[in-house]
Image (cartoon, rainbow, N blue to C red):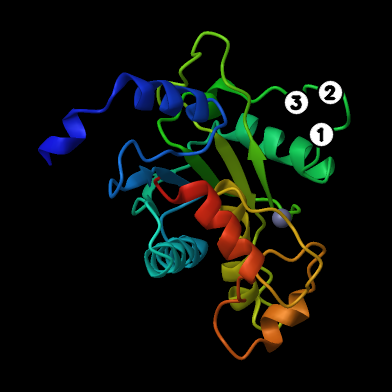
Amino acid sequence: MRRFLFVTTAARFVAAILGAFLLPVAAASGQVVERRVLIVAPDDDDERVMLAREAVAFWNRTLSDLDLDVRLREPDLVIAAPNSRAMENFARQVSQRGGRLPKGSAGPQPPSELTNLQADVVLLLSRQPLMPFAWALPSQPNQPSRSGSPEFFVAIRTREPERRSDDKVLRNVIAHELGHTLGLSHHRATATLMCGPCSSAAAVEAPQEWLPLTADDQSRLRELHLAQ
Ligand SMILES: [Zn+2]
């Protein structure tokens, strides 16, 4: 343990620079960075809470198999207060933009009920049938070091139980969005986890529970999360 206390000034400097790019950085070889995930659910028996926990466990197995130095912490759960309307409104605005920022736009302003939460990733199990997304939040002007405010806002649509294997699709959707928070972007292979555009039929028909990562995804994760 002791060796972690002696981080050189140069290493601190590098860590400070990399920290500005919103991605976790291991300060020393072998030190695991935990990303705090907070699930916001309409109520505590929402079936998607289990799906989200399974998606987090999937990522932790994957990150461990790849021998990387980052994990998602077992998520805390908060039950959305009746006044969570501001967060739902913000989710709708981002979703309507297709989760993309038009050039030169600052995007909709996240509400304080979101930015005040203490987590790296806030995962809203929305009450709306919206298009799911993972949205990088701007750092707050009065919190240049972020000091615990969320870096990513993820919103997940309502379940569609009438659709075949919707829970399997939704579990992969949640894992996909968490993949963005780990730094992955889309590629065109539809039967993979980071597909974009995706076909939900691919998840339904996949023989395995989780859509696979590609070799490119794995190299990208190594690039981002392997301590030097
Ligand atoms: Zn995506």
C-alpha gap between disc 1 and disc 2: 6 Å
Kindly identify the residue that appears in the image at 68 percent across and 79 percent down.
203
In the foreground, 154 or 181: 181
In the foreground, 198 or 91: 198
Q: Residue furthest bottom?
A: 207
Kindly identify the residue that appears in the image at 12 percent across and 41 percent down.
1
Kindly identify the residue that appears in the image at 28 percent across and 24 percent down.
8
Q: Which mark is residue 105?
A: 2
- Kindly state the secondary structure of the residue where label 3 is placed: loop
Kindly identify the residue that appears in the image at 51 percent across and 13 percent down.
144
In the foreground, 214 or 174: 214
The residue wearing badge 3 is: 108
Q: Position of residue 3 (x, y in %)?
A: 15, 37
- The local crowd at label 2, few if under 14, some if 14 to 19, many if 20 or more residues have their Cα within 10 Å, is few
Q: Amino acid at mark 3?
A: Pro
Q: Nearer the viewer, mark 1 or mark 3?
A: 1
Q: Amino acid at mark 1?
A: Leu
Whether label 2 lies within 8 Å of ligand 1 gets the answer: no
The residue wearing badge 1 is: 101
- Kindly state the secondary structure of the residue where label 1 is placed: loop
C-alpha gap between disc 1 and disc 3: 9 Å
Ligand 1 quadrant? bottom right
- Left or right: where 55 falls relative to 216: left
Verify CB contact (< 8 Å) between mark 1 and mark 2.
yes
- Kindly state the secondary structure of the residue where label 2 is placed: loop
Q: Let me know if residue 41 appears in the view.
A: no
Q: Let me know if residue 134 appears in the view.
A: yes
C-alpha gap between disc 3 and disc 2: 9 Å
